[in-house]
Image: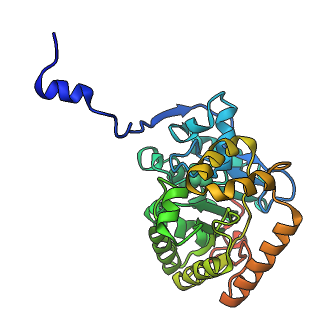
Amino acid sequence: MALVGIARLASQSPLLEAKRTVQYFEIPTRSVLNRTKPNMPFRWTINPYRGCEFGCKYCYARYTHEFMEMAPEDFEDKIYAKAAAAHLLRQELAGVDRKDGIAIGTATDPYQPAERRYGRTRSILEVFARGRGRHLGLITKSDLIVRDIDLLREIARANVLNLHLTITTLDEKLARLLEPRAPRPGLRLEAVRRLAAAGLVVGVNPNPIMPGITDDEPSLDRLAQACREAGAVAFGGGPLFLQPCAQKVFFPFLEREFPHLLPRYRQLYARSAYLGREYKDALAARIGRIRERHGLSAGYAEYKPEIQVEEQGNLFE
Ligand code: SF4
């Protein structure tokens, strides 16, 4: 039967947009703590999720979906929550030296939208809140972190805890292009403010710093100043690292949004995923000047937690 009226119009309407559908899975895992390579500032990492819905164009963690024989684009649409994360962590921590640094959220964001549904990050924080004397870090782009201020404060009373918000730019339009589904920079700054006001140690990472996009000194300086005013004590500063699987997403993005930069990027990353010494040295000097101007430190802060291991006994319940 031939379609008529509104049905015919609907069937002939051009597609404006195909809405993304995100799928969530639970993936079994043998271990929740991953050992890092030597010379990292922490010995262990925890990533409660595989894949990340924020979909940053430069994301280097897309390779983790390649391991599962998926396309780099699947990284933002197929999200895997690790099963029994807190249970595994409790068991594994028994064999980990207290002096070993443990960082949460090094590969995928621990406060991405999946966390609202599955709470794996919160379950991990609950384990740490019952422990003493650890050195912990957590990195995120999401203001959802303020949901857990109660637990974070409890952890910081008996452990050294450094929090890091990633803010690549204050420019909301640019942030929307680079990090399409991450909370906007203003929300992240507000999260810094609330965490610092709660007495937590918080720094900001403007990473990855992108040549010709976010690396100019005035913009980085304004960002550092805003972070300092919000209560941040540290300011990172690492340049973009671009593995081939990240290039598959980032180069077409450049072609669309910054076509004049594409030849330069092709040349910069022709032989390696890392930028050359000359660029890195110039950037390090720029970041050093900015930190000095705003009284910001480079990385992790050491402090004496209110509750010391000696006073409480050497325990992890
Ligand atoms: S928030 Fe981090 S893990 Fe998530 S897409 Fe962006 S860079 Fe990748």
Q: Can residue 59 be seen here? A: yes
Extreme top residue here? 1
Q: Can residue 82 be seen here? A: no
Considering depth in this image, is 87 or 161 the residue closer to the camera?
Answer: 161
The quarter of the rendered structure image containing the C terminus is bottom right
In the displayed structure, would residue 39 be above or below residue 243? below
Q: Residue at x 73, y 51 (%)?
A: 242
Q: Position of residue 250 (x, y in %)?
A: 64, 48
Considering depth in this image, is 254 or 289 the residue closer to the camera?
Answer: 254
The quarter of the rendered structure image containing the N terminus is top left
In the displayed structure, would residue 265 be above or below residue 232? above
In the displayed structure, would residue 88 be above or below residue 135? above
Q: Position of residue 61 (x, y in %)?
A: 67, 46
Q: Residue at x 42, y 50 (%)?
A: 116
| Quarter location, residue 212 | bottom right
In the rendered view, does 198 fall on the left or right side of 18? Answer: right
In the rendered view, does 41 fall on the left or right side of 202? Answer: right
Q: Residue at x 72, y 70 (%)?
A: 237
Q: Position of residue 112 (x, y in %)?
A: 50, 51
Considering depth in this image, is 55 or 279 the residue closer to the camera?
Answer: 279
Q: Position of residue 203 (x, y in %)?
A: 62, 73
